[in-house]
Amino acid sequence: MGRYVVRRLLQFIPTVLGAIFLLHYLTSLGIQLGGNPVRAIFGDRRPTEAQMNAMADSLGLGDDCLTRVGDPCVGLYFDRLQSIFLQFDLGSSFTGRPVTDIIADGLSATVKVVVIAIIFEILVGITAGVLAGLRSGSFIDYLVKISTVLAISVPIFVLGFLVRDMFLVNVGNWFRGGDWPDWFAYGVMSPVYKPDYPWASLVIPGLVLGSISLATTARLTRTSILENVRADYVRTARAKGLPQRRVIGVHTLRNSLIPVVTYIGIDFGALMGGAVVTEGIFGIPGIGREIFRAIQQQQPSVVVGIVTVLVLVFLVMNLLVDILYAVLDPRIRYD
Amino acid sequence: MLTAACGGSDSDDSESTGGGSAGGDLRIYSSEPAFLVPSAADDEPSILVVRQLYRGLVKYDQEGAPQLDVAESIESDDNKTWTVKLKDGYTFTNGEPVDADSFLRSWNYAGNVSNAQNNSYFMGRIAGFDEMQKEGVKKNATFSGLKKVDDLTFTIELTEPFSGFESVLGYSGFFPMAQECVDNFDACNKQPIGNGPYMIDGEWENNVQIKLKRNEDYAGEDAGKPDTLTYRIFDDVEAAYAAFEGGELDVMYTVPPNKIAEVEQNYGETLLKEPSSSFTYLGLPTYDERFQDPKLRQALSMAIDRQAIIDAIFDGSLAPATGFVAPNFDGAREGICEYCEFDEDAAKALYEETDGIEGPVELWANAGSGHEEWLQAIGDGWKNTLGIDYKLKVDITDFGQYLKVADDKKFTGPYRLGWGPDYPVMETYLAPLYTTGASSNNSGYANPEFDKLIQEGDAADSLEDAIPSYQAAEDLLAEDMPVIPMWWGLTTVVWSDNVAEMVHNPITDVDYGQITMNN
């Protein structure tokens, strides 16, 4: 197991270097083809060449290679690698904010929403899936099937706007007019993220963000359970006279969770980057919004910095999922 | 508070208890500012915070005229060399005095190209600007036109006389900076060191909020009224509006355009709506020989039904432009642009007199900002009235890239651009946009007579005497039509029941520090 983890960790290195190079090349090409994004800072007032150059230099975009279309800017790439890995400096944004700060602040908000979404996904999604899978064809099964189709078919921005404008504003105002505790009326029911209630005000956005994945989780669990309750080892367990709780809870569920764990693991990474819509709707100062803005304004160091971190998160999550496999299924060995 | 300040003797010392309505926490909608240091802050959200944190030599009254603020006097015999005397007793929140050095230091820092400050442009009138803008100039270089006389006095020499210079000084780019701020720009940006009625509480929480508390040591006459100002930062104005509706915000400067009708219905009593000074125009590339005949440019302008477009596409929320200077500016005249009036017959007649233009004419705008619709309406109008074919050229999303096309004079047809004033002098709408070779002259307009009139106005004895010259220059534009004026924007402010009295200035917008709150 230990050797397996080390080997996997070593594989991170080429993946990350490659990802950084790709991002570096794409952002450089964007500048080479579209002109230096620094120009936009001056707005309607045309800068002199000296002003342009000074601004470009101060933002690390003054390299000549950025004017030659197709030049991979290898020098710039190695400078970037060196400052990232030797000085832990990811550069700064156009307003002089260190990218490390942007990532730290953005991640803290995004991770909170994603964690809420995942918890919601695990608790409600798996429970609903198990109940539906065990009583196939029952009322609960139909309820789960119909509601999950509904959840999957409503785009997240539609759901988000509905929840914000109808529920949190209107229903929320009713709660705020009543005798409810502050953390609920002004925290949980706040239409937007609130710095005074960093967790409470993210509960509803987390539920919205997790809704589609929750539906998928429930369906995956249901199918998987349906398949496994008829498996030989479950029949054997029953024949041995094990109590129902142990048959389902330990034998069936444990094996049924493998695809679900894979899905949730990958989903964690996907939600991190995909939270941009939810973040926009609920005014959450997260990483998704930062990267969206950075791409719009063509800020290479911010794009490279954030995506690199997201790649790392993805890799780590995948590794965790693979390790979990071995825990869930004794037949899987990593030596 | 006990400092013997010379100013403010007319208003008694009731700063913190004035009228029983001071106090409270005012929660304000804001988008993320770019900078909180005067030399760099040049965007609206930044300036709305900077104006509470810092104070400059002058401020503007309700008519937009400059009034002395930190300055005791600002005098000049020739409008070229200005002597500024400062009031005594003002300090920065770190204890440094607000003296002559604090202003000179700020301007030298901003004007020096090596510091790459966004507001360097505004220092352009000070003598020595060209040397300060040479590539590779030393970081400690200073303007030859700025001289300290004593601790509270300094002189400013301009390259050319300018009668409106006192008004310019109220722009936030001319506010003073503490030495500690210049020494460590990033720290000062995160935790500003100001000289204004408010000071930072904690530090700027990027993308989340900026909290200010009243600066109890502020020696000026208009001390802050609310105890704290909380600027809640939103990326998306619609999310902010949901927050406002949910009781999370007290003042919302800028209502989402598609919500104006709803807001009017729900908050009619607490909504302020007035034409803003932001100018949208359709520039004509006079460097393209097809657009060189003024008659053609006049005809194109006359064939646009501005009001109809505003009603159909913008819910009537804009004011059609009938001149080149914002209506609320001193010297602006209603209806000065006679070719801005919609008249199909006259347009046709004018067009007949020209050689015509071969279509399709390309209409330029930056993509993704909702300009297609109204450009199309204009194109359809031209097609119907003048029989000119048109084509939309709205494919550049990146605004910087679009501006680059403007810089390189590569527009192949009429293009959309906008302009906002830098200071309340009508010259700000004229010189930068139409003077030969000026930094925002994108149409390529070059008229020596126009340049001369602007110069005459600048050199006049007073702003009042300057206005006729500026107006004459505007008359030339109305005849030559290098750009087609389209409309003025709309200022909208809505506030909650917690606000007792809204305070709004036509130049500097909402004055958050002067708003009084209920209970």
Image (cartoon, helix red, strand yellow):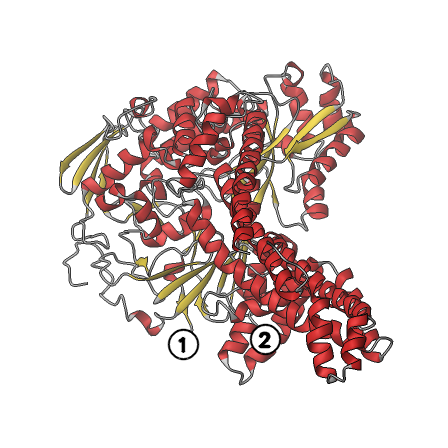
The x, y position of residue A98, in whole percent, is 41, 45
Mark 2 lies on a secondary structure that is helix
The x, y position of residue B346, in whole percent, is 72, 27
- CA neighbours of label 2 inside 10 A, class few (<14), some (14 to 19), many (20+): some
**Foreground of the two, B498 or A164:** A164
- CA neighbours of label 1 inside 10 A, class few (<14), some (14 to 19), many (20+): few
Subunit of label 2: A
Residue B337 horizontal side relative to residue B466, left or right:
right
Q: Check disc 1 and give the amino acid type.
A: Asn
Q: Which residue is mark 1?
A: B519
* Identity of the residue drawn at 34% across and 26% down: B459
Residue B280 horizontal side relative to residue B142, left or right:
right
* Identity of the residue drawn at 18% across and 50% down: B96
Q: Are marks 1 and 2 on the same chain?
A: no
Q: Which residue is mark 2?
A: A173
**Foreground of the two, B34 or B508:** B34
The x, y position of residue A95, in whole percent, is 42, 42
Subunit of label 1: B
Q: Quadrant for the C terminus of chain A, please.
A: bottom right
Residue B178 horizontal side relative to residue B321, left or right:
left
Q: Quadrant for the N terminus of chain A, please.
A: bottom right
Is residue B506 something that shows in the picture?
A: no
* Identity of the residue drawn at 54% across and 77% down: A185
**Residue at the outermost left position:** B150
Q: Check disc 2 and give the amino acid type.
A: Asn
**Foreground of the two, B162 or B97:** B97
Answer above or below: position of B463 versus A49: below
Mark 1 lies on a secondary structure that is loop
Is residue A27 something that shows in the picture?
A: yes
Callouts 1 and 2 close, C-beta under 8 Å: no
